[in-house]
Image (cartoon, helix red, strand yellow):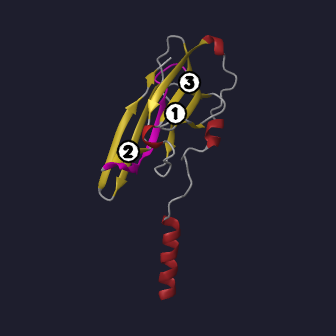
């Protein structure tokens, strides 16, 4: 009886452990399914947007930080046009590039949304991390919307807030 109970507890412990070393819940192979390598670049309007993200926030003092899960939402706000994302580059607090999420342009169908998830344990971005997005849209089409949703829960306490991207070019 004790051996069965001990075995059951061991299995529960194994399956309840967090995955270590994960940097994103969105796997790179998902981007290849949306690849748009052969887009007509001349017939599209170019834009660049900035989005602030917080993978950590200060807690109690400047010497203690708290990790956050960040969801970066990339939305096509057009109900008729496909849009193209050329780059989604993630930077840390000091302006150093951490990673670019896809090598080839990707497409978003009308009204489609895709996300990048930065896991709570990935604190490489720090308290002032951010994204730069480069995109192309058909002329007279609405601009894409970029939002950040940061959250964390600990015990019975929860924290969440949002940021919104701004066009810089």
Identify residue for label 1: 95
Quote the CA–CA distance across marks 2 and 1. Answer: 17 Å
Q: Seen from this angle, which residue lies furthest right?
A: 38
For residue 43, what is the image quadrant?
A: top right
Nearer the N terminus, badge 2 or badge 1? 2
Mark 2 lies on a secondary structure that is strand
Which class describes the residues within 10 Å of circle 3: few (<14), some (14-19), or many (20+)? some
Q: Position of residue 40 (x, y in %)?
A: 66, 16
Secondary structure of the residue carrying tag 1 is: loop
Give the dominant element type of the magenta stretch: helix, strand or loop: strand
Region in magenta: 61-81
* Mark earlier in primary sequence (3, 2): 2
Residue 153 at least partly seen: yes
Going 66% across and 30% down the picture, which residue do you hit? Answer: 104
The answer to whether the residue labelled 3 contacts the one labelled 1, judged by CB atoms less than 8 Å apart, is no
Q: Position of residue 24 (x, y in %)?
A: 54, 46
Q: Does 128 sit left or right of 61 as displayed?
A: right
How far across and down, in percent of the image, does residue 166 sit? 43, 23
Between residue 25 and residue 118, name the one nearer to us: 118
Tell me: residue 90, above or below residue 21. above
Q: Are marks 3 and 2 in contact (CB under 8 Å)?
A: no
Q: How far separated are the C-alphas under marks 3 and 1?
A: 17 Å
């Amino acid at each position: 009886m004790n051996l069965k109970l001990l075995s059951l507890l061991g299995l529960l412990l194994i399956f309840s452990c967090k995955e270590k070393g994960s940097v994103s819940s969105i796997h790179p192979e998902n981007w290849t399914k949306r690849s748009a390598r052969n887009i007509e670049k001349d017939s599209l309007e170019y834009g660049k947007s900035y989005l602030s993200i917080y993978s950590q926030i200060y807690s109690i003092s400047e010497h203690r930080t708290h990790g956050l899960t960040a969801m970066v939402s990339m939305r096509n706000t057009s109900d008729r046009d496909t849009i193209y994302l050329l780059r989604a580059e993630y930077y840390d607090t000091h302006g150093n590039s951490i990673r670019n999420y896809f090598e080839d342009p990707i497409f978003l169908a009308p009204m489609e949304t895709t996300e990048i998830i930065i896991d709570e344990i990935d604190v490489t971005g720090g308290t002032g991390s951010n994204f730069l997005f480069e995109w192309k849209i058909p002329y007279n089409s609405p601009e894409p919307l970029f939002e950040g949703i940061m959250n964390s829960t600990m015990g019975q306490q929860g924290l969440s807030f949002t940021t919104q991207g701004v066009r810089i070019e």
